[in-house]
Image (tube, coloured by chain):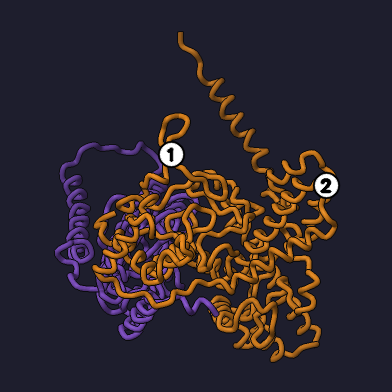
Chain colours: A orange, B purple
Amino acid sequence: MERDLRPPIRTLLGGTLLSLIPACGFEPPEPPRTYATAAETRTAFAEDPEALAELERELLAAFGPPAAPRYAPLEAWAEQDFDPNRPDLALGVGGSGEIDDAERVRVRADNRANFARQIAALERGEPDDVDVPSRLPALRAAWRTLREENAAGRIDLARLRARGVELFEGWYPSLADSSATYRVECLHCHGVEGGGDGPSAQYLLPRPRDFRHGIFKYTALAQPSRPRREDLMRTLADGLNGTSMPSFARLSLAERHGLADVVRLLSIRGEVERRLAATFADEGELEDSAVATETADVFERWSAAREKVVVAATEAPASTPELVALGSALFHDATKGNCSSCHGEGGAGDGAAAWKIGLSGRKEPAYLDAWGRAILPRDLRTGIYSGGSRPIDIYRRIWSGIPGTPMPALGTAKKPDGTLAVSNAEIWALVHYVRSLDAATPER
Amino acid sequence: MRHLAGLLVLALLAAVVAWFALSPQLGWWLPAPASTIAHPIDALFDGITVVIAIGFALVMMLLAWAVWRGARVQSGRARTSHGHLGLELLWSGAIGAVLVGIAYAQLPTWAALRDPNAMPKDGTTANVIAHQWAWRFEHPGADGQLGTVDDVETASELVVPAGEPVLLTLRSRDVIHSFFVPEMRIKQDVVPGRATPLWFTIERPGTYEVVCAELCGFGHYAMAGRVRALARPEYDAWVAETARARNTSGAEDAR
């Protein structure tokens, strides 16, 4: 029997068209109004929703909402005339003092190149030709104010020109500007609160960094430490090779500094929240000044990072077969490097210590990282070094370990008699042995 | 009134030809060529554009004529015919000759760019590694050899000498990407599991944008990089500086 297929097809087409109508009406979602508390925090406060609400109010007061994040000024900062909310690139002016003079010159040169059209129009004396991109609302507003002052006759054209050039050349994004950039560039992996739980995070291996622990794997520092601005800037510029973290070199230098500012704020906010949740879980209450105290303490750790840079006692020696042979011996020596226990005899990341037999009877990774996920040692034959491929980068990985992972700090490891287990020269030998594993692999 | 349709077709033809003729002056054309291979490629591009323009103009004029004439013939039915050996040979032969001519004309350029035997043998080498979603580059370092411990890796920026052949090897870690430098007129797919050779000679120092020209995932838009071509002395200085940075003890990080 033949059926007339026209009515069902008509229904299908009509239904599809009708269903498009509501779809057209959806607005893009607004930025979230507050930073949410982490699941662990809500668990810690499960029995006291009032205390949780109080904590959320205090965190909001201390760090602001995503649309306008900021630090509530601490008393100590007022004394030192320090304010991380007030970055300033004006030469000769202190600002927050967090960007050194050499970097300030680089940022200004980068701004000059990025705003070349606007600055050229100003220098031609044609302020009408200056157009500020709509994605920089704060800069736009500042330029409009200048124009209005000029129109009202308060400043003449020469003054408008000078102040306009300084406006573009000395541009540095506010925390609110950078938070908007963060929402565009970073949020889909790192999440609104920097918890490494953005919508794309579940598809990535390794997972995006959860900033709230304050642990950053690849820095130039002795551990434990929070990262320096330079460490975050390097990750933003170079990405993390072998992970999904791409290079953000396509953003301007000022924008990258702004993102580093947001990462620090989110990390400090998250760490303060985690600490308060832990305190509450232990003591069942929080002091009134708890948020300020913890913020000051965590911020202090970020400031102290500057003192912790690992510097090798000597420059990297040239690679020689003898040095590589020495490195190989140390790599396999259980009383020295002991690297092969995890990284395997050939450096393939298949060492016995990295694996266990699970309850299912299958081979499973033996270790979890600080974020509670299974972690495996790097296959050193791939030549992919997430923290950088310069010899000093690998030196620092070996010397200070990788925080949040089982990779130990060999530079401070002691023998039973209290002396250092490996010397500076021996770490360089290990570096060259590790590099030779990559070079010896012809094709990958 | 009906003749207007024929005039309209001719006006459209005139507008399209004028548009193309004016585009280079208005800046609606390709960016200025930056590599040696870009010149023959541009010549081919222009030549093929002219051939297509002639074909387009002929077809449009034929169409205008048909519309015009159809409007004049007031009565009777259209005459149809089928199979005319002479006509079919004529247009097959004419179009075939044009295509063979184009194919022949582009052979030397193709060979210069792609034939392994015709590629320059000596030049600065570098590895290009594409992955989701970034370009990474491995430079040979001070010893001029890739695969040694002094290789210099960079993210997003390839540094090469200008005025000399540069020999790249392209690899992908995950999916298909495409190494596209518009100003050099070079676009090469990067296929996982393969090492694809590519060469170019940049004519003058400058910075040229690299983009990924193969949709490779949600970060495809962000796969931008640049080629920085330096004059030989500056390039040597850059190599020396990176060599020094590689031997560093890290002291400059501690200020």
Q: Chain of mark 1?
A: A
Given residues B19 and B239, the one toward you in this image is B239
Picture quadrant of residue B141: bottom left
The secondary element bearing badge 2 is classed as helix
Q: Is residue A156 above or below residue A58?
A: below
Residues behind callouts 1 and 2 on a single chain:
yes
Q: Residue at x 69, y 52 (%)?
A: A274
CA distance for labels 1 and 2: 42 Å
Where's the C terminus of chain B, which quadrant? Answer: bottom right
- Where is mark 1, residue-wise? A356
Instruction: Residue at the far top: name it.
Output: A1
- Where is mark 2, residue-wise? A51
The secondary element bearing badge 1 is classed as strand
Residue A392 appearing in the image: yes
Type of the residue with mark 1? Lys
Q: Residue at x 73, y 49 (%)?
A: A277
Q: Residues within 10 Å of mark 2 (few under 14, many from 20)?
A: some
Q: Is residue B224 above or below residue A84?
A: above
* Left or right of residue A43, residue A130 in this image: left
Residue A366 at x, y percent in the picture: 46, 42
Q: Chain of mark 2?
A: A
Q: Is residue A421 above or below residue A81?
A: above
Q: Count up the numbered dots.
A: 2
Q: Residue at x 83, y 47 (%)?
A: A51
Residue A242 at x, y percent in the picture: 42, 55
